Image (spheres, rainbow, N blue to C red):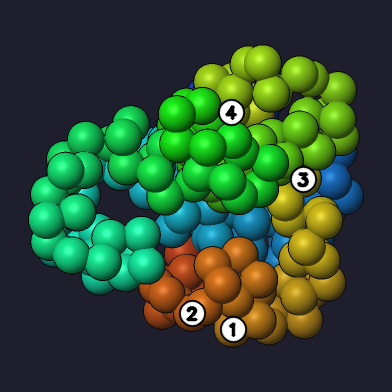
Amino acid sequence: MVNADELQKLGIGSEWVDALNETFQRFNITSVDQRASFIGQCSHECNKFKTLEENLNYKAETLIKLWPKRFPSLEDANQYAHRPEKIANHIYSNRGGNGDEASGDGWKYHGRGCIQLTFKDNYYHCGQALGEDLVSKPQLVAQPRFAALSAGWFWSTHGCNELALKRDWVNLTKRINGGTFGLDERISLTNKAIQSLSKLM
């Protein structure tokens, strides 16, 4: 179990105590390395558990860089720049169970939670696992309990516990991020959590 004092030392608010402990129990995240890895990775992903929704407020140049196929020209990108809802509906359309751009699914099922849950299919499967209808109530994933539980679901379904036990930080980061973005910070946050949680176990 983690407590408020230990989380405070890691820059995490006390409102996360119950959410994290429920997630650890439900998804068999039991060892110090596993729990610290979960906290370290999530801390990087969601700004120390403070940012629970994807920020899609991009300028035109960034849109072209991130999604060149979706925004082939500056003229195209300018129509979407700094309009998060419109951006989400465009970039996430016709994928992962989402409907077309006009359906609004891209925005409805944009990234939320400690490890950004994205796309209607993922909201459905995560909700099935957690016993909650996240398809009709996607905003729940931006609240601590389901933000943590949805991350625990991802963690469990992607074999992250095994990688954490091996302290394979590179492949664990790839499993979560798709690459190694922010690897040094993730390792630093994980090591800090290991030191803090080791005193509890």
Please tell me which of labels 2 and 1 falls first in the chain: 1
**Left or right of residue 182, residue 76 in this image:** left
CA gap between label 3 and label 4 equals: 12 Å
| Residue 14 image offset from top left, x and y in percent | 50, 28
Say which quarter of the image contains residue 196: bottom right
Compare marks 3 and 4 and give the one earlier in the sequence: 4
At horizontal 65% and vertical 36% (from top left) the residue drawn is 120
Q: Are marks 3 and 1 in contact (CB under 8 Å)?
A: no
Mark 1 Cα shell of 10 Å, populated few (<14), some (14-19), many (≥20): some
Which residue is denoted by mark 3 in the rendering?
153
**Label 4 residue SS:** helix
Say which quadrant the C terminus sits in: bottom right
Per the model, the C-alpha gap separating discs 2 and 4 is: 25 Å
Answer whether labels 3 and 4 touch (C-beta < 8 Å).
no
- Tell me if label 2 and label 1 are in contact, CB under 8 Å: yes
- The residue wearing badge 2 is 180
Residue with the mark numbered 1: 170
Q: Position of residue 56 (x, y in %)?
A: 30, 43
| Mark with earlier residue (4, 1) | 4
Q: Disc 3 and disc 1: Cα gap in Å?
A: 20 Å
Q: Earlier in the sequence, mark 3 or mark 1?
A: 3
